């Protein structure tokens, strides 16, 4: 089957797309990007649902999304849920230069290392990961590993964010019905202004 989307050296905007049932792209001995694999690309991913992508090979990363090489990626207003890999980054594996995650839900992804997001810089220039106004919860074994050049602001981060950032909380977001894929916030949610 492979990844649902594979991009190499492109500038692309992806909007209102459901990316599901992918199982990765072979890159050397590795299998990466169950839902999406992007190499040396500049992307804007908006209003997407990246869910139920699974990689089961022993050398694998990025169950939902695998970002690699030079490039800037903005992921906004998107759901990244129920993805898995036997390697790192069940939801997102960030091995690219610069990633921004804004107004996203990253929920119930699993991996051997960092179920939600696995950020690492591979010694790239201008590496950074900025997360803002997002909900990162119920990812196994942990939501995200802490590294350099990572900032989390005004987000609901289960277990509390210990790195750079401000205005973060750790509480039930009061989703409408997450067991059935409804991540809308109900009245009284602490994640609404």
Image: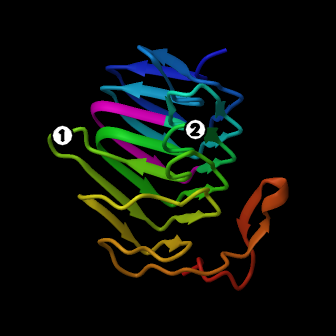
SS class, disc 1: loop
Q: Nearer the viewer, residue 120 or 21?
A: 120
Which residue in the structure is indicated by mark 2? 64
Q: Nearer the viewer, residue 8 or 87?
A: 87
User: Residue at coordinates 35% horizontally, 22% vertically from top-left?
Assistant: 10
* Residue 72 on image: x %, y %: 30, 39
- Outermost residue, left direction? 125
Residue at mark 2 to residue at mark 1: CA–CA distance = 23 Å
**Dividing the image into 4 quarters, which one contains the N terminus?**
top right
User: Residue at coordinates 43% horizontally, 54% vertically from top-left?
Assistant: 101
**Dividing the image into 4 quarters, which one contains the C terminus?**
bottom right
25 over 176 or under it: above or below: above
* Residue 187 on image: x %, y %: 74, 81
Q: Quadrant of residue 39?
A: top left
* Residue 75 on image: x %, y %: 46, 47
| Magenta stretch: includes residue 67 | yes
SS class, disc 2: loop
96 displayed left or right of 118: left
80 displayed left or right of 123: right
Q: Nearer the viewer, mark 2 or mark 1?
A: 1
Q: Which mark is residue 7?
A: none
Magenta segment: 66-78
* Residue 30 on image: x %, y %: 46, 22
User: Residue at coordinates 61% horizontally, 57% vertically from top-left?
Assistant: 139
| Magenta stretch: includes residue 30 | no
Which residue in the structure is indicated by mark 1? 123
């Amino acid at each position: 089957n492979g990844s649902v989307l594979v991009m190499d050296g492109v500038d692309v905007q992806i909007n209102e797309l459901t990316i599901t049932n992918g199982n990765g792209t072979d890159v050397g001995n590795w299998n990466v990007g169950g839902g999406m694999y992007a190499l040396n690309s500049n992307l804007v991913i908006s209003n997407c649902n990246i869910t139920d992508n699974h990689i089961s090979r022993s050398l694998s990363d990025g169950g939902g999304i695998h970002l690699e090489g030079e490039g800037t990626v903005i992921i906004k207003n998107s759901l990244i849920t129920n993805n898995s890999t036997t390697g790192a980054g069940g939801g997102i594996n960030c091995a690219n230069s610069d990633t921004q995650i804004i107004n996203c839900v990253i929920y119930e992804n699993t991996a051997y290392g960092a179920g939600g997001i696995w950020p690492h810089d591979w010694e790239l220039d201008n590496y950074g990961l900025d997360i803002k106004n997002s909900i990162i919860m119920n990812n196994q074994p942990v939501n995200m590993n802490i590294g350099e050049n990572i900032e989390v602001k005004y987000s609901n981060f289960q277990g509390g964010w210990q790195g750079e950032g401000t205005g973060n909380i750790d509480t039930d977001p009061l989703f409408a019905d997450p067991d059935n894929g409804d991540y809308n916030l109900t009245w009284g949610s602490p994640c609404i202004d």
